[in-house]
Amino acid sequence: MIAQGTPWLAMAAGSEGPPPRVPGAGIGDPQAHEDLPYTVEIWDETKHGVESVVAVTASSSIGYAAYYAATREYPDRYITLRFKGDVLIRWNAPAH
């Protein structure tokens, strides 16, 4: 039975919460993503730091597709596609 108001789509009968997380598998853990060198980042409005990472992938084509989608979703933001830390392409938000 699924508890009322539970954000999970499905839970095993008698389950007390979300599935266990793998230790060290967070976005901030660089060792967890060594095999995923492409990242798409959305920067804060002042362009001083990354606000969120919207994609992490091993595929250049998937990375570019995510980058392209991010430029359409956030046209007024600074967005970068990186490969192992190097910026491959960037979207500079239009100046107002």
Image (tube, rainbow, N blue to C red):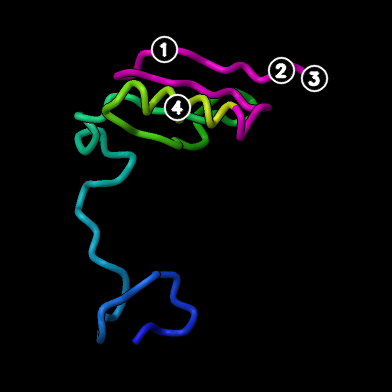
Residue indicated by mark 3: 96
- Is 17 drawn above or below residue 88 in the view shown? below
- Is 86 drawn above or below residue 53 in the view shown? above
Residue indicated by mark 4: 65
- Is 22 drawn above or below residue 31 in the view shown? below
What residue do we see at 29% from left, 19% from top?
A: 84
For the C terminus, which image quadrant?
top right
Q: Is residue 35 magenta?
A: no
Q: Which residues are magenta?
A: 72-96
Residue indicated by mark 2: 94
- Disc 4 secondary structure class: helix
Amino acid residing under circle 1: Leu
Whether label 2 touches label 3, CB < 8 Å: yes
Q: Disc 2 and disc 3: Cα gap in Å?
A: 6 Å
Question: Residue 44, percent across and down?
Answer: 59, 31
Amino acid residing under circle 2: Pro
- Disc 2 secondary structure class: loop
- Disc 3 secondary structure class: loop
- Disc 1 secondary structure class: strand
